[in-house]
Image: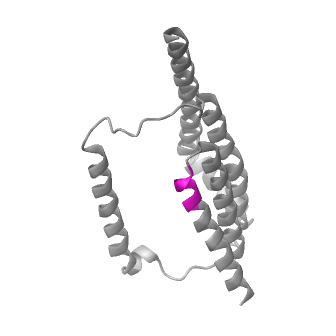
Amino acid sequence: MFVTILFVVFAIIALAGAIGVVLSRNPVHSALWLVGTLLAIAALFVLQKAYLLSAVQVIVYASAIVVLFLFVIMLLGVDREESLRDPLRIQRPLAIALGLIVFALIVGLMGNHWATGASTVTGPLTGGQGGNVEHVARALFTTYLWPFELTSALLVVGVVGGVALARRSNAEEEESV
């Protein structure tokens, strides 16, 4: 009963944080709402006894990625007014149509057993030496090493691209003044 109450509380916190991310006008406030959402999801992982996922959620997402977001937001500057005009007239109706299609697909998949999965087992893996952390580390640094490295390179390229765009736009603004 206590676990159910905690689940509901953390689910409400995660949902409120997600709504705050979308509805905040200030990008810094959106990033802070995102931190709250990610921490609530980490707490939900703890309730499911997925301690490794909880630690990864806090260490990687709630700290590193959000700090990266805040760095890029601060670097690009949030003090400028943004125009809400769409560069392409079809962009907004197309986004709404694609969103409705994805929603319909999710609702359609909810009734299928293969999409929702069978009952799962929580706790440590059985068989073999070591625990969950060793199994995940072995898979990450052997089987999935290439995607892991590509993801880290993609993050670095994103940061460098953000810095390059910020410097170019700042230089153009200074020349026009």
User: What residue is rendered at 69% in x and 56% in y?
Assistant: 56
Instruction: Give left or right: position of 33 versus 170.
Output: right
Specify whether residue 19 is painted magenta.
Answer: yes
Residue 47 occupies quadrant: bottom right
Give the quarter of the image for residue 39: bottom right
Q: Residue at x 52, y 17 (%)?
A: 168
| Vertical comparison of 26 with 107: above or below | above
- Please provide the residue range marked out in magenta: 18-24
**Where does the image place residue 19, in percent across and percent down from the top left?**
55, 61
Q: Residue at x 59, y 34 (%)?
A: 78
How far across and how far down the image is residue 8, in percent? 64, 79
Q: Residue at x 25, y 41 (%)?
A: 89
Q: Position of residue 96 (x, y in %)?
A: 31, 56
Q: Quarter of the image for the N terminus: give it.
A: bottom right
* Coordinates of residue 136 in the picture (x, y in percent): 65, 58
Q: Residue furthest top?
A: 175
